[in-house]
Amino acid sequence: MNWEELFCVETAPMPAVVIIFGATGDLAQRKLFPALRSLHDRQLFNENSRIIACGRRDFTDEGFRQLLGGEPDFLDHISYCRGDNNDDAVYEKLQTLISDFTRQSDLPCNKLFYLALAADDMLNVCSKLAQHGLTAENNGWAHVIFEKPFGYDLDSARELNNALHKYLAEDQIYRIDHYLGKETVQNILMLRFANVIFEPLWRAEYIERVEITAAESLGVELRGGYYDHAGALRDMFQNHMLQLLCLTAMEVPSSFDADAVRNEKTKLLKSIRPFDLKNPDSCIIRGQYTANGDTAGYRQEKNVASDSMTETYVAAKVMIDNWRWRNVPFYLRSGKRLVNKKSEIAVIFKNIPHSIFQGLPPDALGANTLILNIYPTEGIELSLQAKKPGPKLCIGRMTLNFDYSSLGKAPVDDAYERLLLDALLGDPTLFIRSDFIEEAWKLLTPVLEDWQKNPDSLEFYPANSEGPAGAEKLTAPANWRSLV
Ligand code: BG6
């Protein structure tokens, strides 16, 4: 594969103070600090920037830096602020630390807050930040990143949006979805809108169906407490799966501007046909994994109720009511403890209308497929029919394969790194706007309500399998692509 660089946006984040709440937690330790360190090592973190780690545990600055470990030139940027998020003293200390930094450097006071906290604590922290003047934008900007889950259903999401809007303008709110930071996911828009060859075919006339898969082989691990109240629909569908769907199916935006892109995504969501819940075979099904051999079932997992009815798998047939996608099914599935970890978007084209090759009807030739691989590799695969070299007429299938790793280490190669960089640059394109969140809940809340009323609709599937049998009915007579 040859790569010739055509254009590269120069990125130079402004100096800012990054304040991480929940700094000793799992997300901060596993993802956020490594992402900030990597930005620093790639000179994408302004040298005059600072990081304040907020947590309840008792650390000195030095002790916290030791916890992170690594090179001092990154660690020197970090201070630790100990305290309870409900305690005003934390915010007073933050005010002092932030004004000390900005006074020393005589720079504008840009602040990026990252709330790596449980959903219930986020609003509280936000109101405290506002009370203490920390979200004011009088000398520099203030952006706040929120982790999912963003709401529990339509009402709670609306309430949360309304409550946040009391303290923050919408353009200060960065709702994160880490799938949007993945290379292949960002590449969907490049592939579709920077090339002429796909877009004319990207419609009902040429596309038979689209399959979007995010399958995991792990179970809920140590997150049973959270997961048992969430389930796969809230954990994966309301956010990651709908984002993948929207990027794949949306219309061309007028520019690569945050609002232009997000307007198109929301418009697409509004075009999705509500699920016909009276006919579950044709729309959305859920399952829960059970023990298989040495692998525990979901109900045996730590912090999961022994009679839990929470779904660990969801599959849906989504129809989009607009001109482009008339009658084209989009099949979405995501689940835990499946036979393999695999994420992809597969675009399956129609068969040729007529075959000129004797003895080979159009459907025997097979359909072209374009696969956008998200995991385990990130890349693109396009399958074509081609002649086998030799004197006989033999037709076979060949695959053009592009793997991102062949380009070497990407400049920004972790989703959180990319998204933190964007938040520092003030670019919300890859973050979720409030109207998108509400539209997504509008689509899915009736499903949650229906499941609550009809617990028997929960199917069971053995751990390490391809998922529940009901998923097969959705795509019939076609089959899902194999997970292995
Ligand atoms: C998270 C979910 O948002 O995404 C997890 O809360 C899930 O349950 C994870 O495991 C999957 O992310 P990835 O990047 O591993 O596909």
Image (spheres, rainbow, N blue to C red):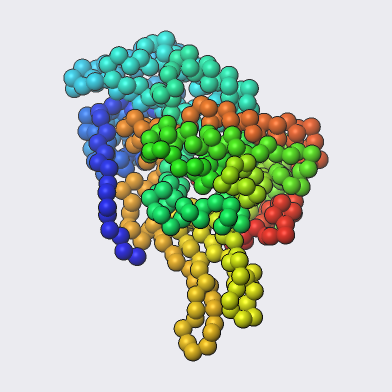
Question: Can you give x and y, in whole percent of width and height, for residue 96 in the image?
Answer: 30, 14
Q: Is residue 78 above or below residue 344?
A: above
**Quadrant location of the C terminus?**
bottom right
Answer above or below: position of 121 versus 373: above
Residue 220 position, x and y percent, is: 61, 43
Q: Nearer the viewer, residue 385 or 94?
A: 385
Of 250 and 409, which appears nearest the observer? 250
Image position, residue 58 (x, y; %): 41, 24
In which quadrant of the rendered view does residue 271 lie?
Answer: top right
Image x and y of residue 263, in percent: 48, 33
Q: Residue at x 27, y 36 (%)?
A: 45
- Quarter of the image for residue 72 reads top left
In-image side of 263 versus 97 (left or right): right
Residue in view at x 57 percent, y 36 percent: 269
Residue 312 to residue 365: above or below: above
Q: Residue furthest bottom?
A: 391
Q: Is residue 251 left or right of residue 66?
A: right
Q: Is residue 139 visible?
A: yes
Asked if residue 223 can be seen in this view, the reply is no
Instruction: Determine which quarter of the picture holds residue 449.
Output: top right
Query: What's the residue at 41%, 48% (across, down)?
Result: 193
Q: Classify the position of the N terminus by image quarter.
A: bottom left
- Picture residue at 21% right of the left edge, 21% below the top: 107
Task: Give the mark count.
Answer: 0
